[in-house]
Image (spheres, rainbow, N blue to C red):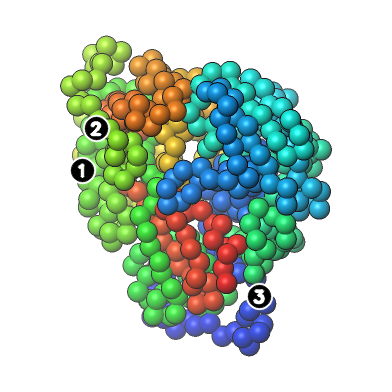
Amino acid sequence: MVSAAFVGACTSHPSSVGEDRARPIEVIVPTAIESLDPRDCFDSVSLRASRLVHAGLTRIDPRTLEPVPLAAKSWAWTDPLTLVVELRDDLTFSSGKAFVADDVVATWHAIASPEVNARHRRLAESLRSITAESPHRVRFELAHPHATLLSDLELPVLEASAAFDRQTPWAALAGLGPFAIGTVAGDRVQFEPRSHGALPRPAHAVVIQPVRDENARVLRLASGRGDVVFGGISTRLFPALQASGVVLTETRGSGLTYLVPRTDAGPLSDLRTRRRLAAAIDRAELVRDFFEDHAQAATDLFAQDHWVRRSATAPSDASLDRADVHDASPAAPAIVPLRLLVSADRSRRMLARFLQQELAAQGFALTVVPLELGTLFARLSTGDFDVALLNVPELLEPNVLRVFLHSTSIPPNGSNRGRVRDLELDRLLDEGAALSDRSVRAPLYAAAEARIVANAYWIPLWRDNVVTLTSARAAGLQVGSDGRWLGLATLP
């Protein structure tokens, strides 16, 4: 643990105001960027960094959680299955090429193509056709009603010539975002401001600097070498960091940290054992003792201010159809051995040990298995685990649950890592995806949430607050509840 006294002794010493102004804004992250190819990136660092370079037709407003135009100028539904999108005519890719409708068409055809094998291929499943009607107008025709098309159009657009290209390195892919990729030195990636992107030209270059050790992240920020840390630092160090001149801002987040049990094999294939595990965790104590109340205890999937929660009341547990739940499975042993997979990040390892100690008194013998992200996700995909500690950075659009919990999304076809097979849950998720009226969708997702929690397909633990720690020069950074990084483009 870094001592508070040592942190307090670290202060920033820029050689001059001019030099400090010219220095790129350094964002310190716990893991390296895996890829900035928008067809594939999925971990939170890569996903958020990718949106600095790439842009889609829409983006999600962090205040309203509604899709708003980005590379699109406007759109209109001509009928329930047809969306016509007018494109902005003032944008260029970072290569200098003008942005036109053919780029949109090629990108979405590539996403849908089995040959390209994009990680986000499921986003194109509902599309019947995509047509360029003019250089700045695209027609999307759906094969069936699909509620989240506008949110799906957040997926970034690539140049038409690159959409099917799998040979070009991600660092060479041109994007529509406010930055271009500059130098890549090992894991350190610099982003250069540019004009004619989806947002106005930024005032500062940005560097993404991976620092895997929490102690080193703290010292780098406190000494003034780094400028921004998005969470991932022990709350006990916040006072010392603030005393050293670091600025802390905090807002409630939209992400969820949860346990995903393997439901088709092993100890947690027994419903009673999963429920026993869910009930054994004192979330209030966890948030109080481990996070010092810089998080929100969670027993449900959606936050209280989410539109599912505002628009519908979840059904009572008694109303759930239990016909396909195997409560008659053999009784669990008194002591349940479990392999708990976590990322190798220090804070996650500490948290896993916290859970290990707490659950030991409740009859669970956890073996903590810390893994680098690539290995972790490989183990999850092959089913080589009992339970894993995971996080979904944004739980804004409920349709994302189809990727994680629908029976057609079991790996390698998706991210249903717990191997959940529940026909009633499939039905609720399918119906919710096919409707556009939120007042009708909300009860479906409330019922899905109740079913997921009651059957412990996911075991919610907490919602992270979005905590941003910045140097004085980055103190104007605006970060919404979604935790995204586009505020780096608007720093004064």
- Residue at (62%, 23%) from the top-left corner? 141
Q: Nearer the viewer, residue 72 or 228?
A: 72
- Residue at (19%, 26%) from the top-left corner? 316
Of marks 3 and 2, which one's residue comes earlier in the chain?
Answer: 3
Residue under pointer 3: 23
Q: Label 2 amino acid? A: Thr
Q: Quadrant of residue 157?
A: top right
Q: Quadrant of residue 340?
A: top left
Q: Against 242, is 176 above or below?
A: above
Across and down, in percent, residue 84 comes to 63, 32
Give left or right: position of 174 versus 145.
right
Of marks 1 and 2, which one's residue comes earlier in the chain?
Answer: 2
Across and down, in percent, residue 470 comes to 49, 70
Does the CB distance between marks 3 and 2 fall below 8 Å? no
Number of the label disc, if any, that sits on residue 313: 2
Other residues around mark 1 within 10 Å, as few (<14) / some (14–19) / many (≥20): few
Q: Against 375, is 273 above or below?
A: above
| Helix, strand or loop at mark 3 | loop
Q: How many marks?
A: 3
Residue under pointer 1: 361
Q: Label 1 amino acid? A: Ala
- Report, in whole angstroms, how far the alpha carbon at label 3 lies from the one at label 1: 51 Å
- Report, in whole angstroms, how far the alpha carbon at label 1 lies from the one at label 2: 35 Å
Q: Label 3 amino acid? A: Arg
Number of the label disc, if any, that sits on residue 55: none
The answer to whether one can see residue 170 in this image is yes
- Residue at (61%, 86%) from the top-left corner? 17
Which of the two marks, 1 or 2, is nearer to us in this view? 2
- Residue at (72%, 61%) from the top-left corner? 194
Across and down, in percent, residue 55 comes to 64, 47
Q: Nearer the viewer, residue 194 or 72?
A: 72
| Helix, strand or loop at mark 2 | loop
